[in-house]
Image (spheres, rainbow, N blue to C red):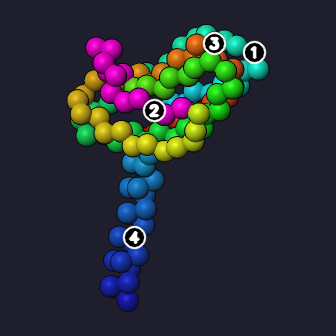
Amino acid sequence: MKKYKIIFTSCILCILILTITGCSSVGSINGNYISSISQNSVVSFNGEKEDIIQITYDVTVEEGTLKIQIKNSDGNIIEDFEVNKSGNKEVQIEDEDEYELSAILEDFKGKFKINAKK
């Protein structure tokens, strides 16, 4: 009986730790445009070395262009995403830095949804 209490307590402790340290939202960018628009939407976040950022996106381009990128504080592009499709991508952060997830719209008509989690 004592063995089962230890196992039960260990399981509860593991669940609590996973709940507390689970994925946290970095941010999201959404848009639905029925007429052409040009703009930049940006979400900034701090990344630690070896962090994994999980990006989910759903994009439909009717006209114009949409670029989805992650850049570091020097403006270097860390990751580019394919557009006009849906997908999931994991990006590993190489250095501690401030990063930007951006959606760059040029004469864009369509819709998109981008979510990022650590």
Q: CA distance from mark 2 to mark 1?
A: 23 Å
Q: Residue furthest top?
A: 38
- Amino acid type at image mark 3: Asp
Q: Which residue is mark 4?
A: 11
Q: CA distance from mark 2 to mark 4?
A: 39 Å
Using the image, determine if residue 79 lies above or below residue 19: above
Res 43 seen here:
no
Q: Please identify the quarter of the rendering in which residue 47 is found.
A: top left
**Among numbered discs 4 and 1, the one appearing first in the sequence:** 4
Q: Which residue is mark 3?
A: 107
In the rendered image, residue 37 lying in the magenta stretch gets the answer no
Q: Secondary structure at mark 1?
A: strand
- Amino acid type at image mark 2: Phe
Q: Which residues are magenta?
A: 71-83
From the viewer's perspective, is the residue at label 3 or at label 4 nearer? 3
**Among numbered discs 2 and 1, the one appearing first in the sequence:** 1
- Residue 81's label in the rendered image is 2
Question: Quick check: marks 2 and 4 in contact, CB under 8 Å?
Answer: no
In the rendered image, residue 72 lying in the magenta stretch gets the answer yes
| Left or right of 90 in this view: 84 | right
**Among numbered discs 3 and 4, the one appearing first in the sequence:** 4
Q: Which residue is mark 1?
A: 35
| Left or right of 104 in this view: 10 | left
Give the image location of residue 4, x and y in percent: 38, 84
Give the image location of residue 97, x and y in percent: 28, 24
Label 4 Cα crowd, 10 Å radius (few <14 / some 14-19 / many 20+) = few
Q: Secondary structure at mark 4?
A: helix
